[in-house]
Amino acid sequence: MPEHLPKACIRNGCRNTSTDGTWVCASCKAADVERIRVQDVQRKQADLSGKLRAKRAWRDRLSPAVIAQNPICQRLCNGLQCRRPSSVVHHRIAPGADAHLFFSVYLDGVSQLIALCRDCHAEERDPKGTPGWCEGIHFVRTEFKPLGMLG
C-alpha cells in the first residue's frame, strides 16, 4: 500500500500522478533536473566566455588588431558591404557554443572573427553565433596579420 495517496501532477498538460506526497510526478521531476543541468552548462559556458573576454590577450591585443586591420564593418547585406566603422569583433561560432575557438581568427580557412559595427552586431545576437554565415555572401573575408608582421 502506497504511503501517500496519488495526486494529479500540477504541470500544465501532464496527466501523470505523484505518489510521493508532492504535486509533481516523477517524469516532470526528471525533466526539471535535465532543464537545470542544461541551464548550468550554459551558465558555465557564459562564465567562461566572460573570463576569456576579460583576458588581456583578447581585450588589448587580438580584438583591437582585428578591428584595426578591418576598419569598415565586414557585414554584407544584399551584396553590399556596410560602410560604418567596425567597433565589435563578432565570433562566427559563439564562445558559448565552443570556447576553444575564442582566439581563432580563422576556422578551416574561413573567417571566425569578423569586425562589425555595433548595429550589425546587435542584429545577430544568437547564443550559437552565426555558423551558417558564408564568406562573400554574409560578410567579407577578415584581413589579419599578426601584430609582429605589420609594417
Image (cartoon, helix red, strand yellow):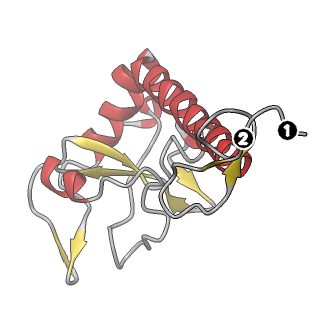
Tell me the quarter of the picture where residue 22 sits.
top right
Q: Secondary structure at mark 1?
A: loop
Residue 62 seen: yes
* Residue shown at 44% from the left, 43% from the top: 145
Rendered image quadrant of residue 81:
bottom left
Whether 128 is drawn above or below 80: the answer is above
Q: Position of residue 5 (x, y in %)?
A: 72, 41
For image coordinates 67% across by 58% down, the residue present is 16
Residue occupying the far right of the picture: 1
The kind of residue on which mark 2 rests is Leu
At label 2, counting other C-alpha atoms closer than 10 Å, the crowd grade (few under 14, some 14-19, many 20 or more) is: few
User: What residue is shown with label 2?
Assistant: 5
**What is the three-letter code of the residue carrying label 1?**
Pro
Q: Residue at x 53, y 26 (%)?
A: 48
Placement of 40 over or under 114, stated as above or below: above
User: Can I make out residue 151 in this image?
Assistant: no
**Residue drawn at 42 percent across, 72 percent down:** 135
In this picture, residue 14 sits left or right of residue 130: right
Image mark for residue 2: 1
- The location of residue 136, given as percent across then percent down, is 37, 77
- Quadrant location, the C terminus: top left
Residue 8 vs residue 120, the one in the foreground: 8
Q: CA distance from mark 2 to mark 1?
A: 7 Å
Q: How many marks?
A: 2
The quadrant holding residue 56 is top left
Contact between marks 2 and 1 (CB within 8 A): the answer is yes
- Locate residue 107, reporting x and y percent: 59, 56
